[in-house]
Image (spheres, grey):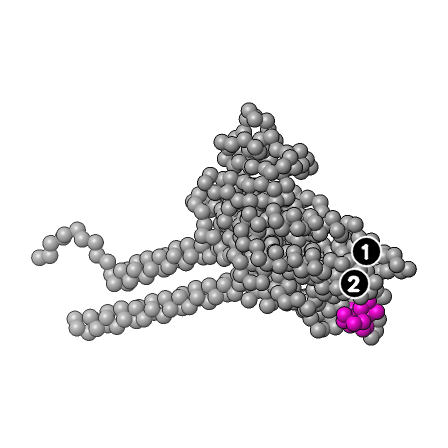
């Protein structure tokens, strides 16, 4: 006589169906996860590419400054690197968006190269709203547009008039506040002349046309508009971009102007600037550290004075 | 009894075969759907990349005249012909600007335009930068610019500008590789 052991009897077909069903569900979940990850990766690459495309119209036309706040759909991280690959070096950017469901950062997408722009930013910034401003750099002719990208609030404590005017021209669209010594600040404090701030700027002269920016233990030299690059970008990124601008761009541009000076002299426009441009090109290509900036800037100033006095100007 | 068992086992075998075939078909169906979907997604991504690149080129063309290598005396949309003639032979700039070629043609366009060289400039019609082609064949965008140069007359110099069309050639498929 058979005893009833109350066991669950399952036919082979059922066991097989359950096993295969589980397998199908596992693969479906696995592929859905993989697909979502790839999709996010694609979105991050797309965002970086769009960002690079956005830099083109931000270039200045006739020397004006431009500012543009940029609001993303969700919180975003922008990674920025700089390299000195020949012939002109490049900035590389990567994007990573926060997954709104899991509240985790997605894997950054492929890095996109930006060769004809100079992005001065921290190596990683994260926020939903970013601020860009573009300032042309003249040395003595226009060499490049400095593109400053940041996300946090900055407070400039007692900045020189020239900087105050520049910031005021952005009309409260820049997330930069100008405050006095005891002014309230919730963001990054940038002190001009005094110390004990997050960023300290030591200016040489009233116009602050040269000096150094101190961030913790690191300090970088600046001249003219490079002060913004020094304040808003991390020192490594700044040094690399300055080398790209001076070593590569200025050296090559001075060479072009040297050739132009020779060329136009044969057409009745004698500028007598061949030697000056050759000197500027050589000094720029020998540039290796920030402290040499002031020397190049002075040379550029001398050239500019000479050019302004010419009846037939070179630039 | 034995024939009954044999019959049952044959029935079970048939069922297993049916299920296996069914599973294979389901599997193939999913693979097919997945392939179609990936093809659709890849094409969509490619199209997006092309659109972004086209937008970038359009933005760049407008601002190209303002880059230090092209610009004439801080004036908007003005190209320094003398400077361009000097830099058109410089290496590395095509890579920097991300273009395959730039063609500047004086307006009105002639049927047999003369290419500009340092020996015939400014008595010429077309300045070709990084390219030897007459008309850009790949994706292009163009704007009208003022092509300027220094001119001297009776010992006095002045700026002389002519209307020109600047065409920018970019090989998008090359860029997307």
Callout 2 environment at 10 Å: few (<14), some (14 to 19), or many (20+)? many
Find disc 1 in the rendering and name its residue. A312
Q: Which comes sooner in the sequence, label 2 or label 1?
A: 2
Apparent side of residue A214 relative to residue A166 in the rendered image (left or right): left
Magenta span: B113-126
- Residue A128's quadrant in the figure? top right
| CA distance separating discs 2 and 1 | 9 Å
Apparent side of residue A228 relative to residue B109 in the rendered image (left or right): left
> In this picture, is B148 found above or below A297?
below
Q: Are marks 2 and 1 in contact (CB under 8 Å)?
A: yes
Q: Is residue B122 covered in magenta?
A: yes
Q: Is residue A268 covered in magenta?
A: no
Viewer-proximal residue, B115 or A286? A286
Mark 1 element type: loop
Callout 1 environment at 10 Å: few (<14), some (14 to 19), or many (20+)? many
Majority SS type along the magenta span: loop
Which residue does the image show at 46% across and 46% down from the upper left?
A99
Viewer-proximal residue, A271 or B144? A271
Viewer-proximal residue, A136 or A105? A136
Residue B72: percent from the left, percent from the top? 76, 56
Q: Which mark is residue A264?
A: 2
Q: Is residue B86 visible?
A: yes
- Residue A173's quadrant in the figure? top right
Which residue does the image show at 27% across and 71% down from the upper left?
B13
Q: Chain of mark 1?
A: A
Q: In the displayed orientation, state which residue is furthest to the top.
A: A182
Residue B85: percent from the left, percent from the top? 74, 66
Residue A244: percent from the left, percent from the top? 58, 55
């Amino acid at each position: 006589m058979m005893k009833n052991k109350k066991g669950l009897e399952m036919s082979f077909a059922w066991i097989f169906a359950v096993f295969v069903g589980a397998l199908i569900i596992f693969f479906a979940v696995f592929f859905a996860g993989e697909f979502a990850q790839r999709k996010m990766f694609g979105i991050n690459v797309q965002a970086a590419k769009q960002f690079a495309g956005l830099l083109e119209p931000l270039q200045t036309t006739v020397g004006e400054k431009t500012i543009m706040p940029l609001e993303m759909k969700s919180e975003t991280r922008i990674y920025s690197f700089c390299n000195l690959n020949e012939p002109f070096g490049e900035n590389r950017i990567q994007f990573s968006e926060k997954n709104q469901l899991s509240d985790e950062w997605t894997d950054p997408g492929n890095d996109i190269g930006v060769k004809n722009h100079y992005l001065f930013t921290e190596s990683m910034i994260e926020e939903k709203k970013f601020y860009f401003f573009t300032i042309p750099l003249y040395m003595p002719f226009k060499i490049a547009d400095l593109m400053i990208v940041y996300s946090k609030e900055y407070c400039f404590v007692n900045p020189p008039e020239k900087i105050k005017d520049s910031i005021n021209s952005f009309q409260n669209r820049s997330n930069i506040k100008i405050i006095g010594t005891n002014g309230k600040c919730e963001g990054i404090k940038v002190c001009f002349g005094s110390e004990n701030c997050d960023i300290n700027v030591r200016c040489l002269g009233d116009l602050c046309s040269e000096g150094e920016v101190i961030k913790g233990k690191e300090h970088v030299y600046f001249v003219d508009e490079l002060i913004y690059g020094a304040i808003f970008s991390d020192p490594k990124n700044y040094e690399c971009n300055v080398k790209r601008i001076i070593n590569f761009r200025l050296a090559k541009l001075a060479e072009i102007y040297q050739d132009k000076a020779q060329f136009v002299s044969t057409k009745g426009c004698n500028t007598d600037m061949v030697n000056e441009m050759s000197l500027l090109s050589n000094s720029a290509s020998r540039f290796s550290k920030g402290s040499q900036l002031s020397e190049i800037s002075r040379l550029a100033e001398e050239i500019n004075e000479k050019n302004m006095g010419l009846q037939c100007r070179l630039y | 009894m034995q024939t009954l068992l044999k019959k049952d086992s044959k029935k079970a075998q048939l069922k297993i075969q049916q299920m296996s075939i069914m599973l294979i078909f389901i599997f193939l169906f999913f693979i097919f759907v997945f392939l179609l979907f990936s093809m659709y997604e890849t094409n969509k991504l490619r199209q997006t990349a092309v659109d972004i690149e086209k937008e970038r080129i359009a933005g760049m063309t407008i601002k190209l005249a303002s880059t230090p290598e092209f610009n004439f005396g801080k004036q908007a949309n003005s190209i320094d012909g003398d400077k361009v003639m000097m830099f058109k032979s410089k290496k590395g700039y095509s890579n920097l600007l991300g273009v395959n070629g730039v063609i500047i043609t004086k307006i009105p366009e002639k049927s047999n335009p003369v290419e500009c060289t340092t020996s015939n400039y400014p008595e010429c019609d077309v300045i070709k930068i990084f390219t030897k082609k007459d008309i850009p064949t790949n994706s292009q965008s163009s704007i009208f610019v003022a092509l300027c140069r220094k001119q001297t007359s009776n010992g006095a110099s002045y700026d002389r500008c002519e209307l020109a069309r600047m065409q920018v050639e970019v090989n998008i498929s090359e860029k997307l590789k």
